[in-house]
């Protein structure tokens, strides 16, 4: 085998390895109609009586969490759907902050998606039927990214607007708390 | 100097005799603060009109103290000479830990407290040691209303009239409760949280009507002021602040002073197509009332969204002041303080009724320390602006043209999409926000607790979705020039200047109380309750409360004949939301940009909701 050929094989192999690592860039079809299914996240901070355990992470979570496309799409929706009006760029206002390490209703992506879909009793609106399932998961991916939890190669390196917080690539990664659920 | 001292003594004697009179018999309405204090001073300064400011009877029945909104107590046992001995008498925990902006009310030996959401009304028995609870009324407002309240789940107060306590709930109800029994008399649903409407203001009862307006200038509501029948709670009239004349209750009696406010259906025409339907102009602040003419005076809130490019035109009838007939709601005049508001400068601040010396006589005037940073003196008969003077550092406006009435924006500071406009002063909460000033007929001065804040602003596209915010701007606030963020200013409305200033590190979000004893009381965001000398501004006394103070201090005469000072400490609201809402100031746009200006506050105070009552030792 001539050396140029060996070199291209090596390059191909390297490309293959890189691609395999690139979950963050993975696209997937998004065609579910509005309101067909909603995530069923349950709080990890609750008691599971009779020796039962917290439900496993929703199977759809891995399609969105740490996925740059989902986080980016969620970032756009976050402004368009007026999430920013209540939660600012993560620091909160009318609604609680999203960039801190406290998750009232759970910090797992399926729990965040459930909060967006169902609303919460102290003023969080319910977006079920107003956004598609994909959009809700995209938003959940972005909201979770505000806390600095997802990997840095998936989040956006620039903030929205002029005076938002430090780019997410630079925010320190917090220690996961109970509410972030050990499963992730 | 000696003359001043003599005058003070004379005032003291007169006020004391008035106090004795009202101790012995029912308070006489024929005596007024203008008569009591006007005679002594010789009347060179502004005085509240007699009909709107009766002599103090020792009670505190409405947030403004009287219809002239003086927030002045005629009690004078506590003076600069003895305030050093002022001591805590009793406390009461309201059980809430969100922004507490309301004053306690005191009516004939009972104190009433209205909490932030869930808007519980407590009655305390002042005739017994420790002021035990008589009853509590729990209206159970919708929890979801907390999610559409722009700036904390606050309530600005209840009001007492004719045996009933009236108050509003965050989810848009007005409720009348029997003041003795604590039983509900009526309740009326006025606002709709699905449209982003909440009610945070204190009602005013005047002319047999309970006057209530909506909040939601950041939620795309359509602003209104409603009048309910005091006895039944039935809607008597509702005046919208946008839309066609018939909805605004503009008819043949409407005579605005300036041509800019004249024309048919300006509430439709001064907007882009249909924008008036979601254009804001709410009413969440203060109303004053002149019983002599049966006229109410109040200002309207900001137009929405904050992104002004999305609402070309003057955006009437937002950000201006109305005079209306209390019986019919008919508009008598309007003056638009800030046509086409750029900076969220709601005009809902207090309107003080004062009769000012004018060409040898007295002119019925309005004193308005406005959010845009100008102190307006207006003719309350016509709506003419007599003077408009900045009372702090300002660069967003160039001035007010007294011929046309129109305010001039500084073109360098007009926010435009796609670029950051930096260093706009005053910032969105204005030179002074909702927290009302006090007006002393003894000194003729207006005591204002206000800010020194500037901001960066960039408009963003705003998307209207009912029940969600309609803001469209990123804002970041910070302290203005001079190295202080708040200041208590004693303002001479006739000389158009500050007589003294007392600077504060933190922005001031507390209302002010002035007393005939010659004192001015207010609180700070980090929980200091302070008393200054009303003439000199010297700090005479202070007390550290358990939480930041944004509540209104009051003074009353207890059943034992002593003068008491009461205030509730509970940090929150727009300024203190970083504490009670646990906001994260790493995002400078948190709390619509306010969090950045008070980043240090969480290290200086914690949430609370405690009543503190002070008096002199026996």
Image (cartoon, rainbow, N blue to C red):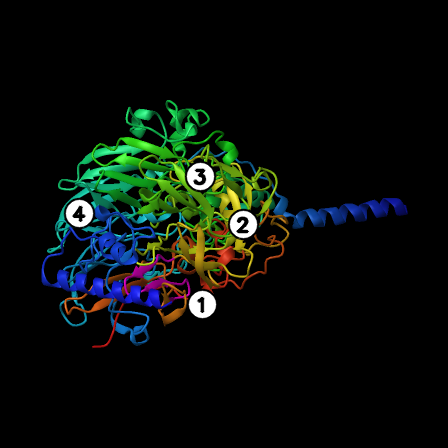
Chain identity of mark 1: B
Q: Nearer the viewer, mark 2 or mark 1?
A: 2
Residue B38 visible (yes or no): yes
Q: Earlier in the sequence, mark 4 or mark 2?
A: 4
Q: How far is mark 4 from mark 3, CA to CA? A: 32 Å
Residue with the mark numbered 2: B455
Marks 4 and 2 share the same chain: yes
Q: Nearer the viewer, mark 4 or mark 3?
A: 4
Q: x, y percentage for residue B21?
A: 13, 61
Q: x, y percentage for residue B463?
A: 47, 35
Q: Earlier in the sequence, mark 2 or mark 3?
A: 2
The outermost residue toward the top is: B264
Q: Earlier in the sequence, mark 4 or mark 3?
A: 4
Q: How far is mark 4 from mark 2, CA to CA? A: 41 Å
Chain identity of mark 4: B
Residue with the mark numbered 3: B470
Residue with the mark numbered 1: B604
Image quadrant in which you'd find residue B611: bottom left
User: Which span of residues is magenta-colored?
Assistant: B510-530
Labels 4 & 3 near each other (Cβ < 8 A): no
Residue with the mark numbered 4: B176
């Amino acid at each position: 085998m001539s050396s140029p050929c060996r070199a291209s094989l090596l390059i191909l192999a390297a490309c293959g390895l890189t691609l395999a690592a690139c979950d963050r860039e993975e696209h997937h079809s998004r065609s579910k109609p509005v309101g067909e299914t909603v995530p069923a996240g349950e709080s990890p901070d609750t008691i599971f009586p009779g020796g039962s355990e917290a439900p496993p992470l929703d199977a759809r979570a891995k399609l969105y969490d740490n996925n740059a496309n989902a986080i980016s799409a969620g970032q756009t929706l976050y402004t368009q759907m007026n999430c920013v009006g209540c939660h600012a760029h993560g620091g909160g206002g009318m609604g609680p902050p999203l960039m801190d390490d406290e998750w009232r209703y759970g910090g797992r992506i399926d729990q965040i998606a459930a909060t967006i879909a169902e609303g919460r009793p102290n003023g969080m609106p319910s977006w079920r039927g107003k956004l598609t399932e994909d959009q809700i998961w995209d938003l959940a991916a972005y909201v979770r990214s505000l806390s600095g939890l997802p990997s840095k190669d998936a989040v956006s390196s620039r903030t929205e607007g002029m005076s938002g917080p430090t780019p997410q690539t630079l925010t320190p990664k917090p220690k996961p708390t109970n509410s972030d659920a050990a499963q992730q | 100097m000696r003359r001043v001292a003599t005058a003070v003594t004379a005032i003291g004697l007169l006020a004391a005799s008035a106090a004795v009179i009202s101790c012995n018999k029912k308070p006489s309405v024929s005596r007024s603060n203008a008569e009591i204090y006007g005679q002594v001073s010789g009347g060179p300064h502004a005085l509240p009109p007699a009909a709107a400011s009766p002599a103090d009877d020792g009670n505190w029945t409405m947030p403004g103290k009287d219809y002239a909104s003086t927030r002045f107590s005629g009690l004078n046992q506590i003076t600069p000479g003895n305030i050093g001995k002022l001591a805590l008498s009793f406390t009461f925990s309201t059980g809430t830990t969100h922004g507490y902006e309301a004053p306690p009310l005191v009516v004939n030996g009972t104190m009433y407290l209205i909490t932030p959401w869930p808007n519980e009304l407590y009655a305390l028995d002042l005739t017994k040691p420790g002021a035990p609870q008589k009853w509590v009324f729990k209206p159970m407002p919708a929890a979801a209303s907390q999610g559409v309240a722009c700036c904390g789940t606050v309530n600005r107060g209840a009001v007492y009239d004719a045996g009933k306590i009236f108050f509003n709930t965050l989810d848009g109800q007005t409720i009348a409760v029997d003041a003795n029994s604590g039983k509900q008399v009526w309740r009326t649903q006025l606002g709709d949280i699905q449209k982003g409407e909440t009610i945070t203001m204190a009602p005013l009862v005047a002319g047999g009507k309970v006057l209530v307006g909506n909040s939601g200038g950041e939620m795309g509501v359509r602003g209104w002021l409603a009048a309910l029948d005091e006895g039944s709670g039935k809607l008597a009239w509702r005046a919208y602040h946008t839309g066609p004349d018939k909805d605004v209750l503009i008819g043949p009696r409407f005579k605005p002073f300036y041509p800019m406010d004249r024309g048919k259906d300006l509430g439709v025409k001064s907007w882009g197509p249909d924008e008036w339907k979601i254009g804001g102009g709410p009413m969440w602040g203060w109303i004053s009332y002149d019983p002599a003419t049966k006229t109410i005076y109040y200002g309207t809130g900001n137009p929405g969204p904050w992104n002004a490019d999305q609402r070309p035109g003057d955006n009437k009838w937002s950000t201006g002041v109305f005079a209306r007939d209390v019986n019919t709601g008919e508009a008598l005049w309007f003056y638009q303080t800030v046509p086409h508001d750029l900076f969220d400068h709601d005009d809902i601040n207090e309107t003080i009724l004062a009769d000012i010396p004018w060409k040898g006589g007295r002119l019925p005037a309005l004193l308005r320390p406005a959010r845009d940073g100008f102190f307006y003196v207006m003719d309350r008969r016509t709506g003419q602006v007599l003077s408009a003077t900045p009372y702090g550092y300002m660069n967003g406006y160039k001035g007010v043209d007294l011929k046309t009435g129109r305010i001039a924006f500084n073109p360098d500071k007009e926010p435009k999409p796609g670029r950051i406009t930096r260093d706009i002063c005053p910032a969105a909460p204005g030179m002074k926000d909702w927290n009302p000033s006090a007006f002393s007929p003894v000194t003729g001065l207006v005591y204002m607790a206000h800010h020194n804040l500037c901001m960066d602003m960039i408009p963003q596209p705003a998307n209207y979705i009912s029940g969600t915010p309609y803001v469209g701007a990123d804002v970041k606030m910070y302290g203005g020039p001079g190295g202080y963020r708040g200041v208590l200013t004693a303002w001479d409305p006739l000389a158009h200047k500050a007589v003294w200033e007392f600077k504060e590190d933190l922005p001031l979000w507390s209302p002010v109380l002035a007393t005939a004893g010659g004192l001015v009381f207010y609180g700070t965001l980090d929980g200091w309750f302070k008393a200054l000398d009303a003439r000199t501004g010297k700090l005479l006394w202070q007390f550290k409360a358990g939480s930041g103070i944004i509540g209104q201090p009051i003074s009353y005469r207890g059943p034992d004949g002593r003068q008491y000072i009461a205030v509730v400490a509970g940090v929150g609201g727009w300024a203190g939301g970083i504490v009670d809402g646990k906001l994260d100031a790493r995002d400078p746009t948190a709390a619509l940009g306010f969090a950045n200006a008070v980043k240090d506050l969480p290290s200086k105070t914690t949430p609370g909701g405690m009543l503190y009552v002070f008096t002199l030792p026996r």
